[in-house]
Image: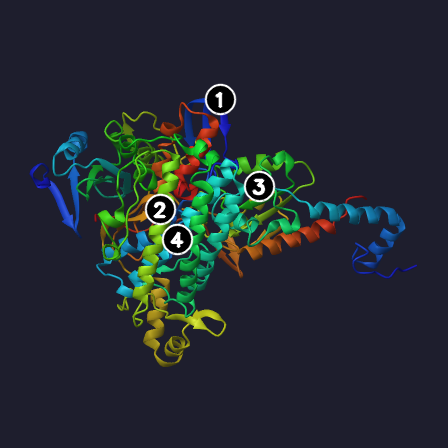
Amino acid sequence: MVGGRFDDVVLVRDEVTVLVDRDDLLGALAWLRTEPGLSFDFLSCVTATHWPEAEPAFWVVYELRSMAEKHRLRVKVGLSETDPHVPSVTPEYPTANWHERETFDFYGIVFDGHPGLTRILLPDDWEGHPLRKDEELGGVETWYHGARVPPTSAPVSSARRP
Amino acid sequence: MPVERIEGVHLGRTPEEVEEEVERGVLLSTMDRAVGWARKQSMWPATFGLACCAIEMMSTGAGQYDLSRWGMELFRASPRQADLMIVAGRVSQKMAPVLRRIYDQMPEPKWVISMGVCASAGGMFTNYAIVQGVDTIVPVDVYVPGCPPKPEMLMHGILILQHKVRTSETFR
Amino acid sequence: MIINMGPQHPSTHGVLRLLLELDGETIVTCEPIIGYLHTGIEKNTEYRTWMQGVTFVTRADYLSPFFNELGYCLGVERLLGIEAPPRAQAIRVLVCEMNRIASHLVYIATAGLELGAVSVMLYGFREREIIMDIFEAITGLRMNHAYIRIGGVVMDLPSDGPRKIRHMLDVLPGRIDEYETLLNDNPIWRERNEGVGRLTAEQALGLGVTGPVLRAAGVPADLRKDMPYSGYETYDFEVPTRTEADAYARYRVRIDEMRESLKIVAQALERLEDPPGPVMVDDPKVGWPSRLSVGPDGIGNDPEYLRHIMEESMEALIHHFKMVTQGVQVPAGEVYSVVESPRGELGFYIVSDGEHRPYRVKIRDPSFANLQSLPAMVEGGLIADSIAANASLDPVMGGVDR
């Protein structure tokens, strides 16, 4: 049913993921919400993942839930590192307000049309976007039983698409 | 003339200190002890519960592990009326200036207990977001480790602090 | 007049800062400012093994640590394609429902304290001590247990566990009756809570609110019934719902939920009386290698197992070493696993790229979404009502800021 409207639908482990283009995002969400039988009226969360050296570099993930039909759906939008802009879904789902602010805070993805895109969890004058893969974990150097434990700095693993 | 040190009476540790103390006179050392006793008997903690340790601090103040046995059940909301700050929980970078400000607003004499490993040393969160030990911001008197420390551990820390307060010298 | 409430404030449930614009005593606008407890848990899990992720994740929403662990472990188990053994699932349900009761007791205690009913706080924490005692007997810790692990639970119940749980089941219904007698028709409680913090169902759904707040607004949405996990479809319980959508309705919903949780605990305990089975999945590449048991000095490694790896088999020692230091290798993929925590929908969006460490663990915390609705509840009311509304929302700042 979902496959009729979208081209890129993945079904893995009983979870449906739909990949959409950035320009189609608002239309897709509106259709998913109003289509009888789907009625995704609840947005659980908005988040992102960063895949450096992959294309697209950012995936913005929207988790939808239907209270009436009791099922879930995931919508993903791919963004490139040089142009991390995506339209904000706050007009459709007001709950996205804080979720998008958090995603901006952690990744630097700009949500166009957001009513007030500022940092939410980190201090307002923080520099950098910590959850990106090229940012360090931080911490201080400690000494333990004569061994020096440096602050963690290595990024985790090479980028591979899930 | 060397003076024999009597435990519980003389505050000094070495024979020279004890002799000096006796020379100062009986009055001031008795005042020291009296003031120290009064201070430790009725400490008023300021509410600075941040995270999980705050719940254990509330449990310590509640019925089963009762803090009012030591005169501390009255957690003052205003730092101006408090003399003990129990930093209970992880201190994030955003919260650090607030912590320092509350500490500065407390009038002397004041003491700080750092409760839990997150407050003492950053805990398990050695990362960008947590201050690695509040002793980088405020002077700490007693560190209580644990994640979170059981109420009995916090009570032990408070008793250690009370001993420290009782035996500290105020008049010199 | 613009006034700042918090972050250090006795009544804001942790480090929440509210920027209030006031007109006399009435709130014109309210802006919650969060982030004072931001711990960087999500970034930290990317630098630890999958099993160590449990210890990080359990400290996010610190009043319901078992739910954090359960959501995370269910997600990783879904990525691995395994399921915990039935006895482990029953134990998980048992401890989770007891955690729900403990969390609701903290709600009653702090709501009472903030509205001035200090004795309610002492009663709430007194009941909570009974449950904390059981948790300490089962897991070794009162909070932040790291008991539910990938593939099952770490240890079976101790021998005196069922007896303590039965004692709790005897005592707690009477105590909840006490709360109802004290607060249900209490004129002060009703005055301060009825009509306060009203949030209709449309507002709640739009703002992403779940949990008792949504159920008090008339929407019977409970993930234990709608999308059951860990065997919840086999338990017999109701989902209490009310329609008034104010703070008093939320209080009643939580009291009723405590009673339903007691029913589930009794049913889970019955299942655990069957002959004991495994509590950790058998696959040696997944299950936590050490068989823990209560030794003569308290909790410790099973002496049989220690003898096996230290004296008998080199391969077993190497395997134990690899499992503890590197841990599970989870196939690449992404999953979103949800549980119904005491505050609402707690979700984990877990991404793996086939390594020994997570690639991304995103915690969708219910308090983060619920707190967004605070301005809608509070604007136009009095400051004192904002305290009552915030208490009825029951946010936990550890979950909000992570």
Residue for point 42% across, 26% down: C30
Pointer 1 indicates a residue of which chain? C
Tell me, yes or no, whether the two marked residues, 3 and 1, touch with CB atoms within 8 Å.
no
C265 or B53: nearer the viewer: C265
From the image, tell me which residue sits under label 1. C25
Indicate which disc residue C99 carries. 4
Label 2: element kind: helix
Residue for point 39% across, 51% down: C101
Quadrant of residue C140 in the image? bottom left
Pointer 2 indicates a residue of which chain? C
Above-or-below relation of A124 to B15 = above
Label 1: element kind: loop
Above-or-below relation of C291 to C395 = below
N-terminal of the pair, mark 1 or mark 4, is: 1
Location of residue A28 in the rendering, given as x and y in whole percent from the top left corner:
15, 33
What is the CA distance from the residue labelled 1 to the residue labelled 2? Answer: 34 Å
Q: Residues within 10 Å of mark 2 (few under 14, many from 20)?
A: some
Amino acid on which the number 2 mark rests in the picture: Asp
Please check whether the numbered discs 4 and 2 fall on a single chain: yes
Please check whether the numbered discs 1 and 2 fall on a single chain: yes
From the image, tell me which residue sits under label 2. C256
